[in-house]
Image (cartoon, grey):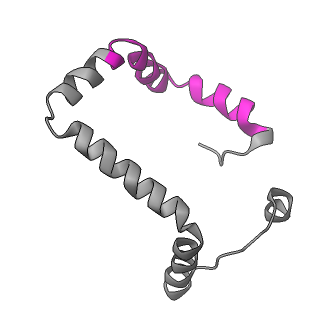
């Protein structure tokens, strides 16, 4: 599959949906997904606690995003990667 980008999205989606295995998998999402999800969550007594904790982690991360992005940059650079900072989407694309 090719890299996804906005200009090529429709072409990429059309190509992907021509794949019979992917079409079958996508079709399965429509059949019983909600019921299977409910069955799975009902079988996990701690589900609401896990969901609340996940929300707390997400909220904390977003509130401290600058710290986590700087930490990511530090770890990425240490692993040999390069992080490019851009103030706008246009700058990032450039």
- Rendered residue at 79%/67% (across/down): 87
**Camera-side residue of 23 and 58:** 58
On the picture, is 54 further left or further right than 11?
Answer: left
Task: Say if the magenta span includes residue 32.
Answer: yes
- Give me the residue at 77% from left, 69% from top: 86
Question: Is 29 drawn above or below residue 78 in the view shown?
Answer: above
Left or right: where 58 falls relative to 90 = left
Position in image of residue 54 (x %, y %): 35, 50
Residue 82 falls left or right of residue 42: right
Toward the viewer: 45 or 1? Answer: 45
The image quadrant of residue 44 is top left
Q: What is the x, y in percent for residue 34?
A: 34, 18
- Tell me residue 91's x, y (percent): 84, 64
Q: Quadrant of the C terminus?
A: bottom right
| Image position of 20 with respect to 12: above or below | above
Choose between 33 and 8: the one closer to the eye.
Answer: 33
First to last magenta residue range: 8-34
Answer above or below: position of 53 versus 10.
below
* Mark count: 0
Residue under the point 42% across and 14% down = 30
């Amino acid at each position: 599959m090719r890299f996804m980008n906005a200009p090529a999205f429709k072409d990429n989606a059309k190509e992907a949906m021509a794949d019979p295995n992917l079409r079958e998998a996508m079709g399965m999402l429509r059949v019983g997904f909600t019921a299977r999800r409910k069955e799975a969550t009902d079988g996990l007594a701690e589900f609401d606690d896990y969901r609340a904790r996940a929300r707390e982690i997400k909220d904390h991360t977003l509130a401290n995003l600058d710290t986590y992005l700087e930490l990511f940059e530090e770890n990425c650079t240490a692993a040999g990667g390069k992080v490019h900072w851009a103030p706008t989407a246009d700058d990032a694309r450039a």
